[in-house]
Amino acid sequence: MLIELLLCLLAGILIGTLTGLTPGIHINLISGIILAISFSSFNPVYLVVFISSMAITHTFVDFIPSVFLGCPDTDTELSILPGHNLLKNKKGYEAVYLSNVGSLLAVFVLIVILVPSIFIIQNLNPFISLIIPYLLIGVSMIVVLTERKKSLALFVLLLTGFLGYSINSFDLTQPLLPLLTGLFGASNIIISIKNKTKIPEQEITKTKVNIKKPLLGALLSAPFCSFLPGVGSGQAAVIGNSFVKNDQKQFIVLLGIVNTLVMGFSFISLYVLGRTRTGTAQAIKEVIGNPGTNYLILIIAVVFISGIIAFYWTDTLSKFFALKFKKINYKILSYSTLLVLIIVVFLVSGVAGFFLLIISTLTGIYCISLGVKRTNMMGCLIIPTILFYFGLL
C-alpha cells in the first residue's frame, strides 16, 4: 500500500505541474474529471492523496506562467505587475523563486498553526454564516481604499460584479472558466501582444528578503479569508499588505505564502466545518464525506511531502524557463497561449462559454486600462456571493 500511496502522490505532483503550467486548465476541472472517471474504481485514500498533492503542487508552479507569460491563475493575478517588473529587469527566475520560498514557508506554517486553527475555527463557526456578507463588504472596501484611484477601483469592482451576476443567465458548464480566463488571462495576453512586449535575456540570481513582514501579513489575512467564499488569495494578499507594508519582492513572497496557505486552510475548514472553500476540498468531500482526524493527518502529511518536492521541482522548472525563454518568440508564444485558452473554453463550456469569454476579455482589457489593481476584478465573485447571502440571488 505504501508504494501505491507514493505513486499517487507523485502522480498528483505531475498533474499539479501540468495544471500550474497550462493556462486555463485548473485543478478544480481536473478534480471533477478524475472523480467522474475513477470514483468507483479507486481506493478513496489514493484519491485523497492524489488530489491533495495535485492541489499543493499547483500553488507552487502556477507562478511560472504568471511571471513568464503574464497569464495568471485567479490566485496569482497580483503577481503580474511585480513579477513582470522583475522579468523585464532580467530577474524572472528571481520572481518565481521568491513566490516559491513563500509557498514553502506556508507548508511549515500550516503545520505549526494546525491545532490552534482548528480550535479557533470551531469557536467562530456559530458566527461565521451571520457575518459573511458583511465581512465580504469590508474586504472589498479595504481593497478599494488601498487604491490611489478609489472611484475607478470601486467602478471596476461593481462592473465585474455585474458581469459575475450575469453569468447566471448563461446555461453552460463551468461558467467560471470563461469568466475568469477572460478577465485575468486572455485580456493580459492581448495587451502584451498590443504593446509588443520584449523580454530580455534572463539572469539566474537570488536575493535575500526579510520574510518577517510577508509572513506576518499572511498570518493576519490568510486564515481570516480562507473561509470567506469569493475571496481569493489576491484579496488576502492585499489585506495582509495593508496591515504590514511590504516592498515589491516581499509582496511576491507574501503572495506565495497566502496562495498555498489558503489552499491548506481549505482542508482544515472541511475537517472542522464540513464546508468547502476550494474545488479540491469539494472533491475530497465527494470522495470521503467529512474527513475524520486520520484523514486530516494524511492530508497534512501529503501537503508537507508534496510541498517540499514541489519547491525543488518548481525551482528547476523556473531555471529552465528563464534560460530558454529568450530563444522563444514571445509573440508566437502569446498567440499560442491565447489559442489554447480559447480551445479549452470552447471544449468545456461550448459556444455560450466562448461568447462569455469574449465579453469577459473585453471587460478585463477595459478595467486594466483604468490603471487600478487587477484584484478589484474579483468583484465578479465577491458581489454575487454577497447578493446570495442577502437572498437576492
Image (cartoon, helix red, strand yellow):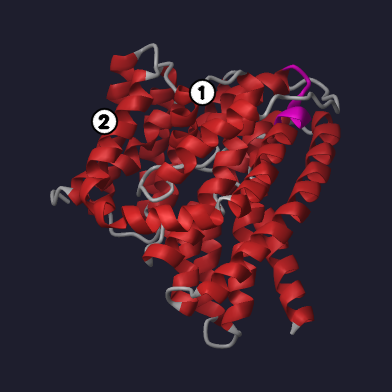
Q: Secondary structure at mark 1?
A: loop
Question: What number of labels is visible?
Answer: 2
Label drawn at residue 158: 2
- Identified at 49% across, 75% down, the residue is 292
Depth check: give the residue in front, 101 or 367.
Answer: 101
- Type of amino acid under label 1: Val
Depth check: give the residue in front, 175 or 32.
Answer: 32
- Type of amino acid under label 2: Leu
Placement of 315 over or under 351, stated as above or below = above
Placement of 112 over or under 328, stated as above or below = below
Q: Which residues are magenta?
A: 89-95
- Identify the mark nearer the N-term, 2 or 1: 2
- Identified at 67% across, 49% down, the residue is 108
Residue 11 image offset from top left, x and y in percent: 72, 68
Label drawn at residue 283: none
Label drawn at residue 244: 1
Placement of 237 over or under 198, stated as above or below = below
